[in-house]
Image: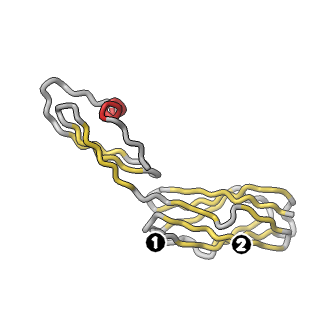
Amino acid sequence: MPQVLSTFSLRQALGIRFLNGSSSTASITLSSTNSASTSATIGGSGTVTAQFNSVSGITTKLRSTSGSVAPKHSLSTTLTVTGSSQSVRLTYSSLPKGVTVKFAKNPVTDSTKGVTDTITISASSTAKAGTYELVFTATGNNGQKSTVTFTLTVT
């Protein structure tokens, strides 16, 4: 939920000054890629009326956040993406040598109510034993991003 500032602190945060006798009205829009946009009407009396509108942000969730795999084997988990009616591209990073990742579908679309994708993580015979943090990122066309981490143990 967005933070609501008092009239005084909102004026102070925005650096608004009122001149004696001014009666102008201004519209101010603030936005963030992961929270909300803010519209404020400033009146000459020094009052601030603010309306906070929710902006859909992309969220990601893994069915399981960790797993083990032996060389020459694979495991699967499900990634759920919600909050976007646009195309969302899925990527990964921090992948150790000998480990591959495959998304069943990429990009995913219309995740406003939630769309799932199966991620298959495979270890080749050259994968070194150890514990690794894999980072999965969902990126919308507008640049909004959400990341989740999967802890992979190669046995």
For residue 76, which numbered disc appears in the image?
Answer: 2
Residue 138, image quadrant: bottom right
Residue located at (80% from left, 68% from top): 123
Residue 4 point in image, percent of width and height: 38, 42
Taking the image as shown, residue 37 lies to the left or right of residue 18, namely right
Q: Name the residue beneath numbered marker 1.
A: 110
Q: What's the distance in space between the residues labelled 2 and 1, CA to CA?
A: 23 Å
Direction from residue 106 to residue 132 in the image, left or right: right
**Residue at horizontal 47 percent and vertical 63 percent from the top:** 83
Q: Amino acid at mark 2?
A: Ser
Marks 2 and 1, the one that precedes in the sequence? 2
Q: Is residue 53 above or below residue 78?
A: above
- Tell which of 96 and 10 is nearer to you: 10
- Please state the horizontal and vertical placement of residue 10, each as a whole percent of the image: 33, 35
Q: Residue at x 41, y 43 (%)?
A: 3
The image shows residue 57 at horizontal and vertical percentages of: 46, 58
* Residue 89 horizontal side relative to residue 46, left or right: right
Task: Give the SS element for disc 1.
Answer: loop
Q: How many marks can you see?
A: 2
At label 1, counting other C-alpha atoms closer than 10 Å, the crowd grade (few under 14, some 14-19, many 20 or more) is: some
- The type of residue carrying mark 1 is Asp
Residue 96 sits above or below residue 9 on the image: below
State the image coordinates of residue 30 (x, y, percent, origin top left).
35, 44
Point out which mark residue 46 bears.
none
The reply, left or right, for residue 72 in relation to residue 109 is: right
Which is nearer the eye, 42 or 32?
42
What is the quadrant of residue 142 in the picture? bottom left
Q: Residue furthest top?
A: 20
